[in-house]
Amino acid sequence: MKKNKKWVEVLIYLILTLGSVITMIPFFWMLSTALKEEWQIQKWPPQWIPNPARWDNFLIVFSQLPFGSWFMNTLFITAVTMAGTLLSSTMVAYGFARYRAPARQFWFISMLATMMIPWTVMIIPQFFLFKSLGWINTFLPLMVPSFFGTAFYIFLLRQFFLTIPIDMEEAAKIDGAGTIKVLMYVLLPMVVPVLITVGIFQFNSAWNDFLHPLIYLNRSELYTLSLGINFFKSDKEVQWNLLMAASIVTLLPSLVLFFVGQKYFVQGVAMSGVKG
């Protein structure tokens, strides 16, 4: 019986390993393309290992275009939207989880119902709103909405708050702590996993956003990475090696952030009650 169980586990690990390798093939090909000469990219049969490896393609990416400036633009927008999302969503989620306000359930369900509205429906009204405010060609349309909360993140945080016994908050209030102090010093240290989860979600959303910068940013010095890498494509040709090198540089922060916060990410999703 134990031998059969061991063989089943070995089979499961083999299947998972095979699936992981298959999933990583596009990334390996992207890295291979980034290190090739242009003539090697169209070679048949495909050459997986570049010979010679052109590591200077990554230097060319930064020298040909203001890639460093675009990187800083993207980093700034992402950092502000993460801060705005965590601040607003945490406060709203805490209110839904703890306050027994009239019609609380109705407003919570109404907020969740907004997730059913296709985001494409809101593009034109938002554009005219931000245009009337004079925010076109600024970072404001990309950052300000994050300070009004996001329904999915509020739901995720609320579910986590509900798993925390209320006795700890009541004990802190007896000692004289107000609502803000209870939230900051009692609850937030306990919800670090879900905060990291929300942070990773928002980071990937803002870092990889293409459509919104495309709509609101018309000056090249304001471009983000997702817009800037399109300069390696033209009507006549695509510089695939430089495009892949730029894509890898763009992808690396997301990969690093996920691997660093993977433990908390899994814990945050699991304890919030969200199923796959």
Image (spheres, grey):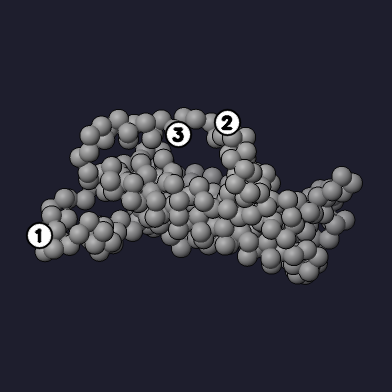
Find residue 211 and report its image quarter.
Answer: top right
Residue that label 1 marks: 174
- Side (left or right) of 168 relative to 240: left
Tell me which numbered mark, 1 or 3, is placed earlier along the sequence: 3
Of the two numbered discs 1 and 2 on the same chain, state the one appearing first in sequence: 2
**What mark, if any, has residue 121 been given in the picture?**
2
Whole-percent x, y for residue 32 in the image = 72, 57
Residue shown at the point (26%, 59%) measured from the top left: 180
Q: Where is residue 134 in the image (x, y as percent from the top left)?
A: 63, 49
Local packing at callout 3 (Cα closer than 10 Å; few below 14, some 14-19, many 20+) is few
Q: Distance between the residues labelled 1 and 2?
A: 48 Å
Q: In this view, does 28 lie above or below 68?
A: above
Count residues near mark 2 (Cα–Cα under 10 Å), then give few for <14, some for 14-19, many for 20+. Answer: few
- The mark nearer the N terminus, 2 or 3, is 3
Question: Mark 2 touching mark 3, by CB under 8 A?
Answer: no
Secondary structure, mark 1, is: helix
Camera-nearest residue between 128 and 271? 128
